[in-house]
Amino acid sequence: MPTPIIASGLTHYSDFNLNAQKNRWHEEVVLVVYEMQWTVRYFIHHREEWAQATQMEDINLGLRAYTYWQSTMWYKYVVIADHAFKNRNNLYLSPFI
């Protein structure tokens, strides 16, 4: 039969583990929010790159159409991801304006 001191120590150790687990989950939540923002920023970056490519003067019509298509595709990714993240996480702050 364990003595009260050992039982108390086990309880303390168990509380320590629970607090550590809670802190790990809090860190995960913070990381997930940042990863959501990074994802949207990544999509925004690619959309801007392709939008700049549409402004090039020395490209043929086929290539210009492709750059518009790419720009539109990345814009759709931005809108869809931003909307999904807003609806699923109230801590999410949209980098998309």
Image (spheres, rainbow, N blue to C red):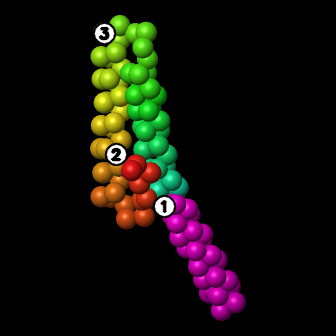
Residue 62 tag number: 3
Q: What's the amino acid at mark 2?
A: Ala
Residue 94 vertical position relative to residue 69 in the rendered view, above or below: below
Single out the mark in the foreground, 2 or 1.
2
71 relative to 13 in the view: left or right: left
Q: Residues within 10 Å of mark 2 (few under 14, many from 20)?
A: some
Residue drawn at x 44%, y 51% is 95
Single out the mark in the foreground, 3 or 2.
3
Residue drawn at x 35%, y 7% is 60
Magenta highlight: main SS? helix
Q: Residues within 10 Å of mark 3 (few under 14, many from 20)?
A: few
Q: What's the amino acid at mark 1?
A: Val
Tell which of 72 and 88 is nearer to you: 72
Query: Residue 29 at x, y = what percent?
Result: 48, 61
Please, what secondary structure does the residue beneath circle 1 have? helix
Q: CA distance from mark 2 to mark 1?
A: 17 Å
Residue of label 1: 29
The span shown in magenta is 1-30
Q: CA distance from mark 1 to mark 3?
A: 44 Å
Please, what secondary structure does the residue beneath circle 3 have? helix
> Which quadrant of the rendered structure holds the N terminus?
bottom right
**Labels 3 & 2 near each other (Cβ < 8 A):** no
Query: Residue 78 at x, y = what percent?
Result: 36, 41
User: Which is more N-terminal, label 2 or label 3?
Assistant: 3
Q: CA distance from mark 3 to mark 2?
A: 29 Å
Tell which of 18 and 86 is nearer to you: 86
Residue of label 2: 81
Q: What's the amino acid at mark 3?
A: Gly
Residue drawn at x 30%, y 16% is 65
**Labels 1 & 3 near each other (Cβ < 8 A):** no
